[in-house]
Amino acid sequence: MSKDVEHSNKTRAIESETTRLRYFRTNNRDIKISKLDPKQGIQQEIDQALEYRKSNQLRNDHQRELLDKGYRLRNIIGSGSYAHVFRAKDLRQSCDVAIKLIELDKCSRHYKDVCLRNEIYVIRELSHENIVHFYEAFNTSLAYIMVMELVDAGTFADLLKKNGPISDDRARRLFKGVFFGVDYMHQKFIAHRDLKLENILINKYGQPKISDFSLSVIWDGRRLVTDWCGTPPYFSPEILQGIPYNPLAYDIWSLGVCLFIMTNDTLPFMFVDYQEMLQKQLNRDWKFRTRYERNISDDLKQLIRAMLDPDNNNRIKITDLIQTRWFRGGGGAVIDTRQQICY
């Protein structure tokens, strides 16, 4: 028996030599796992089995009310502590959609009153080929439901994990769509404020789609904002300093981090300590990774430096970014005209 099981006071394993099945008794009843993956620990297998059971229970709990609205839940795509994304069938339009199911009894009052309300307000204002399309939102007796375009070919983070860092030309083709989407948002004075690899999805035709607007804000263009938000490795210097900031400039910084990671397979600033990270940002104490630098053009290096300018007043704006030589080089942005869009 594995040492993982011997030292656990929560599990008990029984193995059958003929079926190669293992049963683990946990606080959530028995979990059956077949043909354990030797590369994974037993606890990871148990967690996956529990997650599968949880997703089935979620689907069963909400299926009836969603069928009344014209949607049939299928498999779960992603899950958090209170928000879960399912692939679903729109029975009226006969196409697949993504349903974000938010368990209101499990999320904070701040999320319900501020983040969720703001996300719905913002996403209704957006209609662009490089932004995940929003269809509708409604309440059920147990949850708040958001129906959106299904984008199921992974994220930029998945692409990096699968294939490693991308070439200069590949970066241009992918990020052109992202920059066009951000330019569209910034023209409306909408700042995303949580741009990261996990929030940039890819559809089956290779077109990027910006997602998750729960931290976004519609800016008046004058008064600087003060709330601390985002994801630590993508924090800009003004966020770490805790000073009022231009939210559009914050987006550019985060995109610069995304572009750096995708071409260098590492972070420009390792997140260990806030103060140490801030000092490295202010001192421009970062460099391109030696093993990949030869594949990064001088034009792209210049652009990343302009995006990671610690002075947000000097940081390149999206309107100037899409006029740079690197951006305008190569072919045009990939525009998807073949996908099936509901409504």
Image: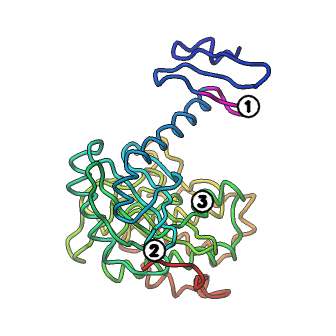
Distance, label 1 to label 3, CA atoms, is 36 Å
Crowd around label 1: few <14 · some 14–19 · many ≥20 (10 Å): few
Crowd around label 3: few <14 · some 14–19 · many ≥20 (10 Å): many
Q: In the picture provided, is 115 more to the left or to the right than 267?
A: left
Q: Identify the residue under disc 2.
A: 131
Q: Identify the residue under disc 1.
A: 35
Q: Residue at horizontal 53%, vertical 67%? A: 151
At label 2, which amino acid type do we have? Ile
Answer with mark 1 or mark 3, whichever residue precedes in sequence: 1
At label 1, which amino acid type do we have? Lys
Residue 191 in magenta stretch? no
Q: Identify the residue under disc 3.
A: 261
The reply to whether dot 3 and dot 2 touch (C-beta < 8 Å) is no
Q: Majority secondary structure of the magenta segment?
A: loop
Quarter occupied by residue 67: bottom left
Extent of the magenta region: 32-42
Quarter occupied by residue 226: bottom left
Q: Residue at horizontal 38%, vertical 50%? A: 83
